[in-house]
């Protein structure tokens, strides 16, 4: 078999927390899994957008970061030895004559699988960028749309733009490591959690950060090195000295090639049943934020539940001749042997 052609039981599109946990549930039922993700590392938006931001609603874990959760999930699925195809996008999906699904990525990787599990979150997340001339010259060196490592911004003169949760969370969290910190928003009202807004205003009152009620107008600098940002306030234009601009104007979700897979869609989401989390195409499942059903909650824990039920039906496709036995990891020596804990 060619080095970029693979055959497996299940292919999971999306290597975020829900996609990773799907590997665990599928593995307990003896199904081999390959994962595809457009990012260059597992973890999805958890690791990409808020790797150091605390998460408080994972059962049994009072607090962890997005990267911590990713690391724990990777450790949990290690016994099942999944194969990752990172930095590539699932571009096409066709049904082969032998009944298997064939997924092809944008770099030519071909994976034949009995079942396909779409765990792609909301699709590909693209930041909404401020309409500033010459913006691309500064991106990645002085202008950023997410914080992957806080240490990257230690000692920087930071200007954060935005009025939502991300903008205010990072204003508060980066303040201790920044040399100077300023926040700019077009009005003196914020869409963030009230507690975070109060923390921000306390920092303003103590002189820890500067708050500007203004709109971004122009970047000042050269060769990718930012020196200041020109803004327009109620009294006119002025410059805010800074060497780093963090722009948090939200994200646009693009479903991408998944929209062309022949699956029914409902406002860019994939309708599923709540027994198997299967789409209207047999053998194709959707779990996590990308699916839709009555009462859906976009929570990681909901995606974990969906992965467990999905795996039960996936087993029936992969092993039609075998009887499915429900077992508990706490009492099954067979499952414990698979996990290497017996």
Image (spheres, rainbow, N blue to C red):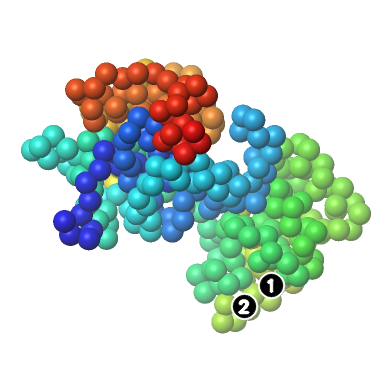
Locate residue 211, reporting x and y percent.
79, 56
Q: Quadrant of residue 158?
A: bottom right
Q: Position of residue 43 (x, y in %)?
A: 50, 48
Helix, strand or loop status at disc 2: strand
Closest to the observer, 92 or 330: 330
Q: Residue furthest right?
A: 206
What residue is at 78 percent from the left and 58 percent from the top?
175
Q: Nearer the viewer, residue 81 or 101?
A: 81
Q: 33 left or right of 55? A: left
Would you say 13 lies left or right of 122 here? left
Which of disc 1 and disc 2 is earlier in sequence?
2
Which of the 4 image quadrants contains residue 210? bottom right
Question: Which disc is residue 113 wearing?
Answer: none
In the rendered image, is residue 164 in sight? no
- Would you call the spot at circle 1 few (<14 residues within 10 Å), some (14-19), or many (20 or more)? many
Q: Which residue has dot 1 on it? A: 243
Q: Is residue 261 above or below residue 146?
A: above
Q: Residue at x 85, y 52 (%)?
A: 203
Look at 76% across and 36% down and name the residue there: 194
**With respect to residue 330, does 240 lie above or below?**
below
Residue 314 in sight from this viewpoint: yes
Distance of mark 2 from mark 1, alpha carbons? 7 Å
Residue 194 as seen in the image, left or right of residue 317: right
Q: Quadrant of the N terminus?
A: bottom left
Residue 92's x, y, as percent? 22, 47
Identify the mark at residue 225; answer none if there is no mark: 2
Residues at circles 2 and 1 in contact by the CB criterion of under 8 Å: yes
Which of 126/21 is in front?
Answer: 21
Name above or below for residue 114 compared with residue 4. above
Label 1 sits on a secondary structure element that is: loop
The percent position of residue 312, horizontal first and vertical second, equals 34, 23
* Left or right: residue 48 compared with residue 55: left
């Amino acid at each position: 078999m060619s080095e970029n052609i693979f055959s497996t039981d299940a292919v999971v599109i999306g290597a975020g927390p829900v996609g990773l946990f799907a590997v665990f549930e599928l593995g307990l039922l003896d199904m081999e899994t390959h994962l595809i993700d457009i990012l260059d590392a597992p973890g999805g938006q958890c690791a990409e957008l808020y790797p150091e931001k605390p998460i408080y609603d994972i059962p049994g874990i009072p607090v962890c970061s997005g990267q911590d959760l990713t690391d724990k999930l990777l450790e949990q699925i290690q016994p099942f030895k999944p194969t990752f195809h990172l930095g590539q996008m699932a571009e096409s999906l066709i049904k082969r004559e032998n009944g298997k699904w064939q997924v092809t990525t944008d770099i030519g990787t071909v994976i034949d699988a009995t079942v396909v599990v779409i765990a792609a979150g909301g699709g590909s997340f693209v930041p909404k960028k401020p309409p500033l001339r010459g913006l691309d010259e500064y991106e990645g060196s002085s202008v950023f749309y997410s914080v992957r490592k806080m240490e990257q911004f230690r000692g920087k003169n930071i200007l954060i733009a935005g009025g939502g949760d991300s903008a205010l969370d990072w204003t508060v969290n980066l303040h201790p490591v920044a040399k100077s910190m300023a926040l700019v928003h077009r009005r003196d009202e914020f869409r963030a959690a009230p507690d975070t807004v109060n923390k921000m205003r306390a920092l303003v009152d103590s002189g820890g950060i500067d708050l500007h009620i203004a709109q971004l107008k122009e970047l000042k600098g050269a060769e990718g090195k930012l020196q200041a940002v020109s803004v327009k306030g109620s009294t006119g234009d002025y410059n805010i000295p800074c060497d780093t601009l963090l722009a948090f104007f939200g994200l646009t979700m693009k479903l991408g090639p998944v929209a062309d897979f022949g699956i029914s869609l409902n406002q860019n989401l994939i309708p599923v049943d709540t027994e198997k989390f299967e789409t209207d195409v047999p053998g194709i499942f959707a779990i996590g934020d990308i699916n839709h059903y009555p009462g859906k909650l976009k929570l990681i824990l909901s995606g974990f539940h969906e992965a467990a039920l999905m795996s039960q039906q996936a087993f029936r496709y992969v092993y039609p001749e075998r009887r499915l036995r429900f077992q508990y990891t706490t009492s099954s020596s067979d499952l414990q042997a698979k996990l290497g804990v017996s």
